[in-house]
Image: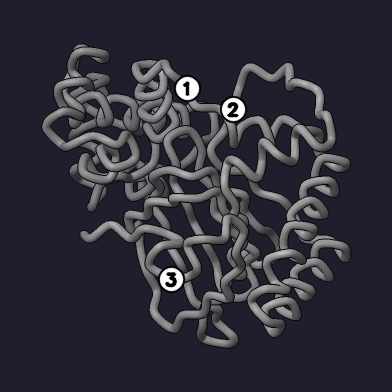
Amino acid sequence: METIILPDVLNLSSSKSIVVYDYKSTIEISKQQILLSKNTFSFLREGAKEVFFDNSNYAIDNSEFLLMKSGNCLMTEKLSSESKYYRSILFFFSNEDVLQFMRKFNLETSSSKITYSTHAFRYDSFITRFVDSLLDILKLSKSIQENILKAKFEEIMLYLIDLNGVDFLYSLMENSGHQNLQFIQTIENNKLNKLTIKELSFLSNMSVSTFKREFEKNFNSSPIKWFQDKRLEHAAYLLKIKSKRPSDIFEEIGYENLSNFIQAFKTKFKVTPKQYQSN
């Protein structure tokens, strides 16, 4: 699968750090490899969106919007059942824009030790008007757009900080030098997501061969066996604690049919799923 680089592929002016693009599509995509060369707001208007990053993932409809850090992600876009198309207003900005904003408003350092590559926020009346204003700005001349969008960037950031604090902003600037820790976080965060080794390699910014080598070094297991064990352990939790039926969960765990799930479960736990529930 070809990797798409955004916003480069949209042929927007490379000289402008803050740009907006009204993206529309009638074609669904599933786990498309995306390299975000800039931080991005995705103001979803039609359809549904799912993203997987190294340390976070979200599935949203058009009642929410996303803030995504530059880097590698997998993106799914689903068409609206009513309009039969997908639409998202994309607002791109650089790390330098964030730094200038932080200096201008003398923001205090975040105390959070945990940072995430993406954040989801719910629409409210202010955000709805804000997105509408972005569409109005796109009708103006390019020179005017550039100056107004700088002010709009400050507007949305100040508003979100007032509602949510500054941690999300500092997450954008976090550039961890602990590659090994970041790799482990990527694996742990996606252990129950049905991602392929190739997809996980992309999120880790590694070749498949490097990914497998690093995986075995850190987890003392092959990726296939480790993920199978984790998903079967999750199945045991769903059976025992959540009282789910085997027929309800085998697909969620990643098995194509019930008999294969039962056999794998019995191999690991020495009893069938039903026997495990009754013990």
Residue type pointed to by label 2: Thr
Q: Marks 3 and 1: in contact by CB < 8 Å?
A: no
Give the CA distance from mark 2 to mark 1: 10 Å
Q: Name which quarter of the figure residue 43 lies in.
A: bottom right
Q: Please tell me whether mark 2 or mark 1 is closer to you in this view.
A: 1
In this rendered view, identify the residue nearer to me: 124 or 259. Answer: 124
Task: Kindly report the distance in space between the C-alpha atoms of the residues bearing marks 3 and 2.
Answer: 29 Å
Label 1: which residue? 176
Taking 193 as reference, is 45 left or right? right
Name which residue lies at 18% across and 31% down.
224
Q: Earlier in the sequence, mark 2 or mark 1?
A: 2
Q: Which residue is mark 2?
A: 115
Amino acid of disc 1: Ser
Real-space Cα distance between discs 1 and 3?
A: 29 Å
Residue at (82, 40) in percent of width and height: 161
Helix, strand or loop at mark 3: helix
Residue 234, percent across and down? 41, 30
Q: Are marks 2 and 1 in contact (CB under 8 Å)?
A: yes
Residue at 44% from the left image edge and 51% from the top image edge: 36
On residue 10, which mark appears? 3
* Residue 142 rendering spot, x and y as whole percentages: 64, 76
Is 118 located above or below residue 179 in the figure?
below
Dot 2: few (<14), some (14–19), or many (≥20) neighbours within 10 Å? some
Residue 238's disc is none
Q: Closer to the observer: label 1 or label 3?
A: 3
